[in-house]
Image (spheres, coloured by chain):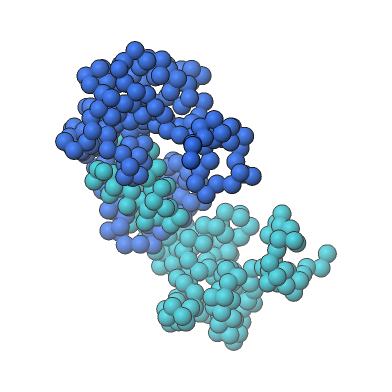
Chain colours: A cyan, B blue
Amino acid sequence: MTNAIDRLVEQFSKLPGVGKKSASRMAYHILDGPSGRARALADALASLHDLIRRCGICGGFTESDPCPVCADPGRDRALVCVVERAQDIRIIEETREYNGVFHALGGLIAPLEGVGPGDLSIDRLVSRLRSGAREVIIALNPTLEGDTTALYLQKILKDLPVEVSRLASGMPVGGDLEYTDRLTLSRSLRGRIRM
Amino acid sequence: MTNAIDRLVEQFSKLPGVGKKSASRMAYHILDGPSGRARALADALASLHDLIRRCGICGGFTESDPCPVCADPGRDRALVCVVERAQDIRIIEETREYNGVFHALGGLIAPLEGVGPGDLSIDRLVSRLRSGAREVIIALNPTLEGDTTALYLQKILKDLPVEVSRLASGMPVGGDLEYTDRLTLSRSLRGRIRM
C-alpha cells in the first residue's frame, strides 16, 4: 500500500529464514518503534562491510588483520581447525573447548554446483601446515559435500607430518535412538567410544 | 568476536520472532553478500520514519495524507471497518473483498495493562460515523481484549443510526474438528450459517 514499507518488507524478506509474513511483522515493528531504533539497525548495516574484513591468515571475519585469534600468543598455532565458512569459527569458539587456530576453506567441494578443490583455500592451508603444525581437526559438516571435502583433505595431507582428525559424528546430546536416522546411528556405532 | 558483527546481531535480535541464532545467520548472510545489499536494507530502514506518517482520517500508515484508501473516490465511505492497529488495514486490503474505508483504534481496551477507552481513537470514530455512515464492521481479534473492546464499541454505537457487525469467528478454512479448541468450536456453533 505504501512504498517505503513495501521496500523494507522486500529487503527483510531477502534475509535467510524470513518469509513475507515475518518480514512484514518486522517492518511494522520498526515502524511502531522509535525512529532511533530503526537508525541504529541502519547504521549497524551500513558500516558492516566497511569495518569487517577477512583475516589474512585464517580467513575469518575480523575488524583487525590478523584477527584476534591469530594474533593471540596464547593460542596453540600447531593445532589448526579447518572449517567451511568464516562464521563457523565463532561456533567453535563458543564451546570454549578449543585453544588452537583456524582455517576457513571458503566452501566445500561440490561438483554438481561447479565447486572444485581449486575454488577453496586448500593451497594456503597446506602451506600453513608445512610451516609447522602438529594436528589438523577437520570440522566440516557431516554432509555429502563435507564428507567429500574431508576425504580430499585427508588425501592431500597424508604426506605431511601432521595428525588429521575429524569431529565425531553421532547422536546429539539428549537425542533418542527412536528418532535418530539410520545414517547417524551407523556413524555413532562406527565411532563408538570405549568407556 | 568482532564488534561490528555483534552490534548487527544485537540489533537483528530485537526484531519480533528473531532469536540469537537467527540474528546471527542474518548478519553473516549480509556479511557474505555484496555491500550494496546491506546498504539497500540500511537505506530502507533509515528513511522509513521520514517517509511514513499516519493518515489524518483513518490513522493508517501512509506516505501521503490522506492515505490512498481515504482519498479514493471509488471507496464506500459509509462502510467503516474498525481495526486494532494500522498494519491490520493491509491484511484486510489483501483479501480484495472490501471496498469501504478503515478506522485504526490504536490498540484494545486492556485494564490490566492500563489501557482504557480514552487511550484509543474512539471519539474520532464516533464523530466520523456521525458525519454519515451506514455500517461499521468491527475487525478486532477474537481475544479477551478484542471481545471487550468490541462490546464497548457496540454499547457506544448503539444510539447511532449505523449497523454494527463483527468478523465471523470459527474454524479456519482447512481446519480439523479434532484439533479445534473448545472455545473456537462453540463460537463456530453459535455463529453457524444456514446453508
Residue A100: image x %, image y %? 58, 64
* Residue that extends furthest to the right in the rendered view of this protein: A195
Residue at the far bottom in the pictured view: A159
Report the side of B159 relative to A152 (left or right).
Answer: left
Residues A24 and B79: in front is B79
Q: Residue at x 64, y 77 (%)?
A: A163
Residue A99: x %, y % from top left: 60, 60
- Kindly tell me whether residue A163 is visible in this rendering: yes
Mark count:
0
Given residues B90 and B174, the one toward you in this image is B174
Q: Is residue A130 above or below residue B116?
A: below
Q: Position of residue B12 (x, y in %)?
A: 42, 46
What residue is drawn where x is 33% and y is 19%? B122
Q: Residue at x 28, y 29 (%)?
A: B79
Would you place residue A135 above or below residue B127 in this image?
Answer: below
Q: In this view of the protein, which residue sits in the foreground, A80 or B193?
A: B193
Instruction: Give the quarter of the image for residue A59.
Output: bottom left
The residue sitting at 31% across, 26% down in the picture is B135
Q: Which quadrant is home to the N terminus of chain A?
A: top left
Q: Is residue B140 above or below residue B14?
A: above
Position of residue A143 measured from the top left corner of the image (x, y, whole percent): 58, 72
Q: Residue furthest top?
A: B159
Split into 4 quadrants, where in the image is the C terminus of chain A? bottom right
Question: Splitting the image into 4 quarters, where does residue A150 fall?
Answer: bottom right
Residue A123 visible to the viewer: no
